Amino acid sequence: MEEYGRELEFKLVEIVNQPPLPPSPEALAKDPNAEHVDVDGKRGQTLAYVEESRKYIVETFDGDLVAIEEEHLQEYQPPPVAEGGFDLAFPGYEGRAFEFQSDLATLLTEQKYCVVQMTLKQGDRKVLPRQVQDIDNWVRFMPEFEPVYMGQRPDGKKAQWYLSGDNQDLDMLAIEEARQETGMLPGLETADEHLKHLAISICNIAPYLGFNGICRSNAMLHMNCINSEEEMNLLDDARSRAVGAGVIQGHLSFYHRRKICMIYFVNGSGGTLTLHPANRAGEDITISCQEGQAVVFRHDFMDYTYLPEGRQIAMQAWVFREQQAGECSLSQPELLAYSDSIEAIPRGPLYGNNGGSVDNMSFCTRIPGLVVAPENYWTGLSSGYDGVIRIPLCRWDHDMYWHGEPDIAAQIGKAYTQHKGLLDNDQQMFVFDNEFFGLEEDEVRKMDPPQRCALEVGYDCLFRAGYTKPKLRGESMVMMTGTALSDFESQQMNQWRMPIASNTRDMLNLSVTAARLHYCLGMKGRCGTVETACSSSLTAVGLVHAQMRPDQAGQQKLMGRQEKIGMAMGANGHFDPFYMISLCSAKMLSIQGRCFTFDQSGDGFVRGEGIAAMFFKQSEGEDLARLAMLCGSCMNQDGRSA
């Protein structure tokens, strides 16, 4: 027997040519003058098919629950996300839950994000702005914490953690009235409930994504500040709050355990959400923010920038992986038990009699092992890696310059080791955004690659300290760079490889390396390049420190005007085997191809390349934002014994 009308069951549909529907008996019981419901042109999903009336039960994305004949329905295919559409609709019926979770897992695996259309009732949409208006304890995170929660460019926005059922700042009378009218939780409670169900679906598919999802964070409201005055007041409050060890540990645990972020646009359309793949692994993805939609993305693989329009409101939450053995919890109650002992730890030393210090505020690295950020560096230290690899063919054919027996290698002018700590050619050493720094392609081709990398790493370090290109223009800053004569020079000065131009020598000059960043970014102040072999970058730090140390009362001033901010850098690159061969002839390099420092098995060192930068500033007292304090430095040369 033919089943009539089953084609559209559990489908996305659009209601067409439907006259207004009479109000339901429940609506008439509450309001005898209730108007007819106009659902023509609305979209939603079918939940069931009623044989007796031959009608579909349709739930629109506005939350209307209506019975519609098939002749007034057509299957709806949402437009692409780039055109304001969505990937999936959150199921309003348990029968579609498995299919939804399967599709969600596929999208999060393949494209790392998914736009989900939610069902948000008109009553909830109307009450939400009133509820948010009643919240008066908005906050800004500490500047060092903000990007972890609010993404890139958090300036101009504010946040508030929403505790379901326990927020005393909301108009509880209005909530209760709405609850009595609808019999359901209104506004923020409904949106939080939606995120809870979405998080449950994510936890169910988490093993397919490579982790065990066990819990969801509290929801966080996210919107623009009313004006710049409110923004500055909230920022001042954030900076004035003392941050204990428990808070920092909880923040670090949040950062390392968050896996999936859900951003639910609960009021207002417009604005954009831009997803940034980690390490620039792909193009940025810009999504238009549509009311009633939620964007789910892999926060462990992507960062984001949320630019709301006007008074648009977003509610977001995160799904966490399970806690690993020995890992600190999010709340960290065990640390609180030792708060008195932690407070008893002596404060860091201050300089002499003026109460000031030179603090490290940010750093950035580009070193072997695809380490391109401080977070990668910490991961490398935690895992105990060394970044040493066999010299790849893309640098040079090392087999031509290598012999495994050290004594024979020395006699025939070859190296006995075949390992180095090398940067990745494609992602670290030979990529460069010349347009960002205003450099011509022809000029860039002649530049020493470590010099190019120093530009990017230096700016990254300054950006992490809170600077941008407009802010840096005209800024006075001392900068010292430790570097060495690069193997790249011999290649550039060989005319059979590349014609020597009038500026070829200038592009390779070590003095240009430190001055290049000042020139490209329009900064002022003392800068220089130092070359003291293996201690070059340490010497650069010492020189920066000498020109930043706060003057002491009664002390003779040796350096003239002391700078308030400064940066020390180190840069090095290897592009041919000949310097390695000379070190092997002196038996200075490890035969094993590994460093075993302070170990009886140590038989030499291993050469490595990389670029790193540290930004310093003068501080008064305890600066909670600092990463470390530069307590002292000293340089010396003891003559022939060196």
Image: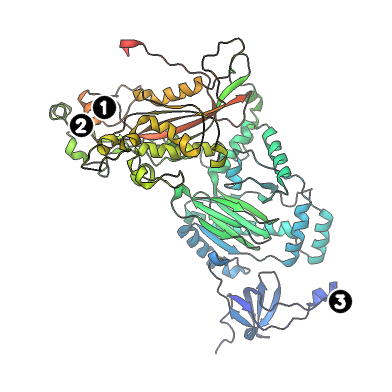
Vertical placement of 302 versus 399: above or below? below
Rendering coords of residue 498 (x, y %): 25, 43
Q: Secondary structure at mark 1?
A: loop
Residue at (27%, 45%) from the top-left corner?
394
**Structural distance between the alpha carbons of marks 3 and 2:** 95 Å
Q: Is residue 594 left or right of residue 356?
A: left
Quarter of the rendering containing residue 380: top left
Vertical placement of 453 versus 547: above or below? below
Vertical placement of 258 versus 61: above or below? above
Nearer the observer: mark 3 or 2; the answer is 2
State the mark number for residue 589.
1
Q: Is residue 414 left or right of residue 24?
A: left
Quarter of the rendering containing residue 297: bottom right
Q: Is residue 364 visible?
A: no
Please report whichever mark, 3 or 1, sits nearer to the chain's N-terminal start: 3
State the mark number for residue 32.
3
Residue at (30%, 26%) from the top-left corner?
605
Q: Nearer the viewer, residue 503 or 294?
A: 503
Whether residues under marks 1 and 2 lie with C-beta atoms below 8 angstroms apart, the answer is yes
Rendering coords of residue 101 (x, y %): 54, 63
Q: Looking at numbered disc 2 in the image, what kind of residue is underneath it?
A: Ala
Please report whichever mark, 1 or 2, sits nearer to the chain's N-terminal start: 2
